[in-house]
Amino acid sequence: MTPAVARRRKRSDIVADAIRARIIEEGLVPGERVPAAWLGTESLKVSRGTLREALKALEVEGLIASKTGPGGGVFVTAVEPESALRMLDNLFLYEPPSIAEIYAIRKLIEPELAAVAAGALTPEALASLEATVRLYEAEPVSSEEEYDQRMAELDFHIELARRSPNRVLGFVAAFLASLLRDMAVCRDIYRQPNPELRESGLNYQVRLLRAIRAGDAERARTVMREHMAEAEKYMLERAAMSLRRGLGKA
């Protein structure tokens, strides 16, 4: 078998890395201008076309923004978590992971997310989580409203992730929930009527909020672990049923 040949990096990618590294090393923060001297074609030893391509790559990544006119230039920007999540979602757009793969990680991440949040959330953060729960407290009056409530339950997990004191943990948890929300197989499952599911999810969220508010990390971890195990079981069972129905129609 012929060994794979490493792809030669584009010159513009190398230049983008050099600019990124200098921004980090010099400690520039969002809103600050990138000195024009850093972006000279002579100092970087590249053509104008290569430099434009490098700057465009950094703009797509959300690291910089270019402004024209008086006071214009290249400025450092902050990457929004939602934009980063969307970009990662697109990575799996055509080859999504399986439900089992997602829950293998969710079962590890979500209980720790809950434990870290216990006693550490602000009153405003707790109020935001409670407001999300209220979106699916009432009985749905239509299948569309029932689907919206399923989405609201996922939003509860994303909101908890956003509020996490551990930003890395929170980002990973939000990404996994975002994957579930966007996957076609999961959307089909969420659209299937199941009144008991809303009650079960609501029960877990209420118990979880009580544990978090009380600062009981171990209880929060236990509740979330039970919730993830139950959710995984339900999703895998429904996915298998959908697959059998699809095979039966073939």
Image (spheres, grey):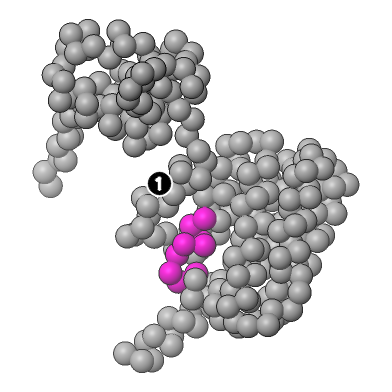
Asked if residue 84 lies left or right of residue 217, the reply is left
State the extent of the magenta-drawn residues as a range: 178-186
Q: Quadrant of the C terminus?
A: bottom left
In the rendered image, residue 219, in percent from the top left (x then y), is placed at: 82, 52
At x 42% / y 52%, what residue is drawn? 89
**Vertical placement of residue 148 versus 173, above or below:** below
Residue farthest to the left, as pictured: 2
In the rendered image, residue 189, in percent from the top left (x then y), is placed at: 53, 75
Query: Judging from the image, what secondary structure is the residue with disc 1 in?
Result: helix
At x 22% / y 26%, what residue is drawn? 52
Q: Which residue is mark 1?
A: 87
Inspect the magenta stretch and tell me whether residue 71 lies in it: no
Indicate the quadrant where residue 198 lies: bottom right
Asked if residue 190 lies left or right of residue 136, the reply is left
At x 27% / y 14%, what residue is drawn? 39
Q: Residues within 10 Å of mark 1 (few under 14, many from 20)?
A: few
Task: Confirm whether residue 118 shows in the render.
Answer: no
